Amino acid sequence: MSISIPDLVAVRARRPEAIAEAAARRARRPLVGDSGRLMIVAADHPARGALGVGGDRLAMANRADLLHRLCLALSRPGVDGVLASADVLEDLLLLGALENKVVMGSMNRGGLAGAAFEMDDRFTGYRAEDIERFGLDAGKLLLRIDYEDPGSLRTLESAARAVDAMAARRLPVFVEPFLSRRVDGGVRNDLGAEAVTRSLAIASGLGGTSAYTWLKLPVTEDPDDMEGVLATSTLPVVLLGGDVGPDQDAAYERWRKALRLPTVQGLVVGRSLLYPASGSVEAAVDTAVGLL
């Protein structure tokens, strides 16, 4: 698909109502299709100032390149949809790339990467009413909890009210929980089995109902621990990808093992598919789809 930035800018400047019109006429589909699995490509990182991939600190800063990679990924067989912030999803809407796709809106992007307030994951993106108004299929929220930071209680409460607001509209919400802590001025997520288990248990109990809640979880440091971790809840789970690593084959194998577990319903992966070490978005996406 050809990406014309001048055309997108012209529509935004002269006919901003075209975005709502495109959303209203978009062909929709069920969240989970005939395969019973979900393959979602994630691109909500820029809205949190997280533009780096591998050693390139601004890899995701080129919007034309990002949109090209997203359109390539969305065109591959077995890819169900995309997770992104409003600006990215609206570009994709105007390009006609979201027909019959699952569209997930990213809700809280306030904890900017590297900021002193990074752990303050406020809801600066989609609200539940926005997701309903634009006819999106689901929302996603980040839930990082630091036991040593009293501000984490505010994050928990905000996340719980977002779960309530989504459930009131019968809209699925994907909660991405971590136990996190500050190390050498940065935020580090604990991927040990006990920490992931605790974060899963906390996220499962948010809000007045869990009927519309899904969990978006990392694979633990030792993939063999995942069976015990996922025994903590009956909520449906998708696995997240993370940054591009030096051994992508090892990441694929970790996903393959976890995908055999009964609560795991699919993958939500971003940078490692959009900016693969191999250079081929198509090959990376096809390999991930093959795991399902």
Image (cartoon, rainbow, N blue to C red):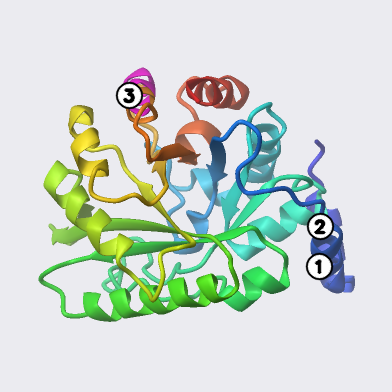
Give the quarter of the image for residue 39: top right
Q: Three-letter amino acid code at disc 3?
A: Lys
Disc 1, SS: helix
* Residue shown at 20% from the left, 59% from the top: 180
Look at mark 3 in the image and give the residue it sits on: 257
Q: Badge 1 is on which residue? A: 12
Residue 254 sits in which quadrant? Answer: top left
Is 71 placed left or right of 23 in the picture? left
> Does the magenta run of residues contain 256?
no
Depicted 9 relative to depicted 233: above or below: below
State the image coordinates of residue 273 (x, y, percent, origin top left): 51, 32
| Relative image position of residue 123 (x, y in whole percent) | 45, 75
Q: Residue at x 34, y 26 (%)?
A: 251
Marks 1/2 in contact by CB < 8 Å: the verdict is yes
Q: Position of residue 2 (x, y in %)?
A: 82, 38
* Image spot of residue 41 (x, y percent): 56, 41
Q: Label 1 vs label 2: CA separation?
A: 6 Å
Per the picture, the main secondary structure of the magenta-coloured stretch is: helix
Position of the N terminus, as image quadrant, is: top right
Which badge, 3 or 1, comes first in the chain's sequence?
1
Q: Which residues are magenta?
A: 248-255
Residue hosting label 2: 8
Query: At x 55% / y 51%, what residue is drawn?
Result: 61
> What is the number of the mark on residue 233?
none
Secondary structure, mark 2, is helix
Query: From the viewer's perspective, is the residue at label 3 or at label 1 nearer?
Result: 3
